[in-house]
Amino acid sequence: DLIAIALSPHLRRRGLFLIHAFAAVPATATGAALIVGGIGAGKTTTGLALLAAGWRLLSNDSPILRAAEAGVEALSYPGLLAAYPDSFARFPATAHLAEAGRAGQGRPKITAPAEAVWPEVWAERAACAAIVFPQIEARTEHAIEPLPPPEALRRLLPHAVEQWDKAMLPAHLALLGELVRAAPAFRLRLGPDVSALPEVFARCLEPR
């Protein structure tokens, strides 16, 4: 993370823009889903549900976006999976991480290499095909609602733009504008059944 922060101004000047998101792509498709949200929104748990269903990982926290011939492409950014024990406990492949985390002291979040859980999990790049903003709610089933591009852009800004880097704001905003035009956006109201999330995301990635 410290390397990403240090490099981000140099990356931006080469047309490469970091975004705070979980990014994954289905094993049988070429389009990636960006899962965007703040702390406690359910972003990581949602992403883990996709990996447990066989999706491939582009980034747990900081995929790199760049302009492509048609839309915006997400590039892989390596890093560790980081989640609370309760999130890891929801999936058989990561339950042992939850137990180790609960045994520790003073570390509410635990980290692990994704490839130690799913050896072939990493993908190199993929076109951005959907943007999903999760939020945890007291409900029995997941619900997903399309968002218009202006609202999607408004929600993206706090997770992408560095306001202090004023010289790069026009280029950064242009890229995000192209992203919301090319990739449909959705608000995902999360229920408790994590096993149903891959099917919900498959609908988001259906061609339109």
Image (spheres, rainbow, N blue to C red):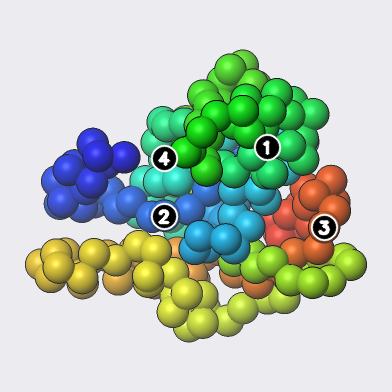
Disc 4 and disc 2: Cα gap in Å? Answer: 13 Å
Contact (Cβ within 8 Å) of mark 1 with mark 2: no
Can you give x and y, in whole percent of width and height, for residue 12 in the image? 20, 52
Q: Give the side of residue 169 with respect to residue 196, left or right.
A: left
**Mark 1 or 2, closer to the camera:** 1
Residue type, label 3: Pro
Along the polypeptide, which appears first: circle 1 or circle 2? 2
Q: Where is residue 193 in the image (x, y as percent from the top left)?
A: 85, 53
Q: Quick one: SS at disc 1?
A: helix
Neighbours of disc 4 within 10 Å: few (<14), some (14-19), many (20+) = many
Q: In the rendered image, which quarter contains the C terminus?
A: bottom right
Q: Label 1 to label 4, Cα distance in Å?
A: 25 Å
> Which of the 4 image quarters holds residue 201?
bottom right
The label number, if any, that marks residue 20 in the structure image: 2
- Residue 1: percent from left, percent from top: 31, 40
Q: Which residue lies furthest to the right in this view?
A: 140
Find residue 133 and report its image quarter: bottom right
Going by the numbered disc 4, the residue's amino acid type is: Leu
Q: Give me the disc on residue 88.
A: 1
What distance separates the C-alpha of mark 3 from that of mark 1?
Answer: 14 Å
Horizontal side of 100 relative to 93 (left or right) equals left
Q: Earlier in the sequence, mark 1 or mark 4?
A: 4
Secondary element at image label 2: loop
Between circles 4 and 2, the one closer to the viewer is 2
Identify residue for label 4: 75
Above or below, comparing residue 43 to residue 41 in the picture: above
Could you say which quadrant of the image residue 63 lies in? top left
In the image shown, does 81 or 102 lie closer to the viewer? 102
Disc 3 or 1, which lies upstream in sequence? 1
Instruction: State the residue at coordinates (79%, 72%).
Output: 138
Sequence-first disc among 2 and 3:
2
Foreground: disc 1 or disc 4: 1
